Image (tube, rainbow, N blue to C red):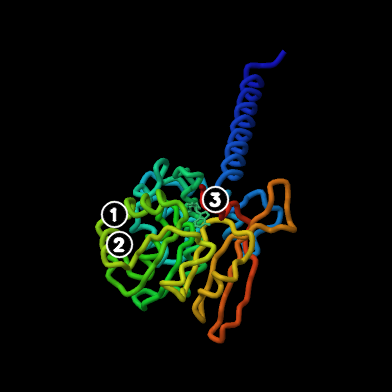
Amino acid sequence: MKTPYQTNLIVLASAATALLLGLYLVRKQDNLTCNSADFLQDQPATTGNKHSKSANMAWRCSGRTNAELISNLYKSQLITSDRVRASMTSVDRAHYAPAAAYEDSPQSIGYQATISAPHMHASASESLLPFMPENKGARVLDVGSGSGYLTHVLANLVCGADGTGDGKVVGIDHIPQLTELATNNMRKSEEGRRLLDSGKVEFVTGDGRKGYPDAGPYDAIHVGAAASDLHPILVEQLRSPGRMFIPVEDAEDRGMFGAQYIWVVDKDENGEVKKKRDMGVRYVMLTDAPK
Ligand code: SAH
């Protein structure tokens, strides 16, 4: 016979176990289908604690408002730069994410595309930041621009939060409905309209694997979908110096779910190119345009 106290303890322990299991399964599911830091990675991210920590922090970083979401990412050190913090604070994610805008998780935007999780946008922006000075005419290419959210954040970094500084960002996506969606999303704010009307932000439809030489060379290139290789054409379109942030599918290292890693490709003043493998991630693939 168990005492009522013992029975209560058993019920409590079972409830806690069920809750933890539920959390684990939902988190795992989220990670398998979305653009986010890969918490299934056995190896810690090579850049240190910050990114390997990110998936575990994801839920804790969500907020009730845009300001709260960004503030929580900052408190958790998933954003460390004040410039990135200011830029992400000034772009309301609700203009770009159709649901759960202030959750630190990716969301579907249709056409088999997702708006990436805020911690991934923060990570990409921070990696490219040294090559994106404000009001210095920096040029940036955002490949697989999808919702347009990151394109807007990058534009704020190079043109300032009010969009009046000197700089240019091109967002390229191969689905015309998405370049239209991104444009419409950006038109929801006054400084978004200013960036578009002044031509400082341009959304173009095309195969991003070929880059967009018309507006290059670029100080920074962000690739928002996983590539099969490092795409030399994109590296060619980098300025000297310049940096590319690109997720690449690793053909050798295929775990149970395949493996992707961020690669950071730097071109120095003399045109010499250095590549460094960074954290494990999970992005949708760069593909041929649907027929
Ligand atoms: N940065 C975007 C991510 C969108 S998901 C965001 O956070 O909103 C990846 C995007 O890559 C999709 O919009 C998809 O349409 C686009 N894409 C896939 N293959 C492409 C290609 N070959 N050229 C250009 N865009 C591509």
Q: Which amino acid does label 2 sit on?
A: Leu
Residue 117 shown left or right of residue 228 in the figure: left
Disc nearer the start of the sequence (1/2): 1
Disc nearer the start of the sequence (3/2): 3
Q: Which residue: 42% across, 41% down?
A: 100
- Judging by the rendered image, the residue that carries numbered circle 1 is 187
Q: In this view, does 288 lie above or below 270?
A: above
Q: Nearer the viewer, mark 3 or mark 1?
A: 1
Label 1 and label 2: CA atoms lie apart by: 8 Å
Q: Which residue: 50% across, 55% down?
A: 119
Q: Where is residue 133 in the image (x, y as percent from the top left)?
A: 40, 75
Label 3 and label 1: CA atoms lie apart by: 25 Å
Q: Please identify the quadrant where the N terminus is shown.
A: top right
- Judging by the rendered image, the residue that carries numbered circle 3 is 35
Disc nearer the start of the sequence (3/1): 3
**Badges 1 and 2: C-beta atoms under 8 Å apart?**
yes
Ligand 1 neighbours mark 1 (CB distance < 8 Å): no
Q: Which of the labelled discs sits on residue 196, or is there none?
A: 2
Label 3 and label 2: CA atoms lie apart by: 26 Å
